[in-house]
Image (spheres, rainbow, N blue to C red):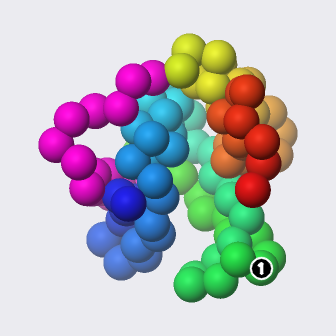
Amino acid sequence: MGSLTYDSSYRVDFDDRVLAHLQIVIGAKLRRGEAFYFSWKGGDDTTEGRTTIWLHASLSLRYQYSADSQPALNRHWVEALTVSANSAGGLQLLPEPGETPA
């Protein structure tokens, strides 16, 4: 289980595979100077509700992986997450294509 630390103060845990895909999509948006929302189901230590953060290049992000090796990337998942990130609602954490939602 890896983690994403936002603005040096807020930390959320994600599976390494999820985190690797988020890093690609978030990095591409921020590299282009695009700020956006990022939302996922669940909040601080809960499976209920939804959490949303505002991502901007001026805020620090830290991706911490539990494994030494990078997971293989699913191009279709990256594309789906990118479409979501480019929408008015911002990046929504979507299940990997071919996977059943939890």
- Identity, as a three-letter code, of the amino acid under mark 1: Glu
**Image x and y of residue 56, in percent:** 49, 49
State whether residue 44 appears in this view: yes
Q: In this view, does 95 lie to the left or right of 64?
A: right
Nearest the eye: 85 or 21? 21
Nearest the eye: 46 or 8? 46
Q: Residue at x 56, y 15 (%)?
A: 75
**Image x and y of residue 7, in percent:** 37, 67
Q: Which residue is drawn at 61% across and 63% down?
A: 53
Q: In this view, does 71 lie to the left or right of 32?
A: left
Is 74 rendered above or below residue 35? Answer: above
**Image x and y of residue 40, in percent:** 69, 59
Q: Which residue is drawn at 31% across and 71% down?
A: 8
Q: Which residue is drawn at 45% across and 23% down?
A: 73
The quadrant holding residue 62 is bottom left
**Image x and y of residue 89, in percent:** 81, 46
The reply to whether the magenta stretch includes residue 67 is yes
**What secondary structure is the magenta-colored segment mainly?**
loop
Q: Looking at this rendering, what residue extends furthest in the top direction?
A: 75
Residues in magenta? 58-73
Question: Which of the image's four quarters has the C terminus?
Answer: bottom right
Q: Looking at this rendering, what residue extends furthest in the left direction?
A: 68
Q: Looking at this rendering, what residue extends furthest in the bottom direction?
A: 45
> Which secondary structure lies at badge 1?
strand
Residue hosting label 1: 48
Nearest the eye: 60 or 94? 94
> Dot 1, how many residues are within 10 Å of its Cα: few (below 14), some (14-19), or many (20+)?
few
State whether residue 56 appears in this view: no
Question: Which of the image's four quarters has the N terminus?
Answer: bottom left
The quadrant holding residue 70 is top left
Is 12 rendered above or below residue 55? Answer: below
Is 58 rendered above or below residue 3? Answer: above
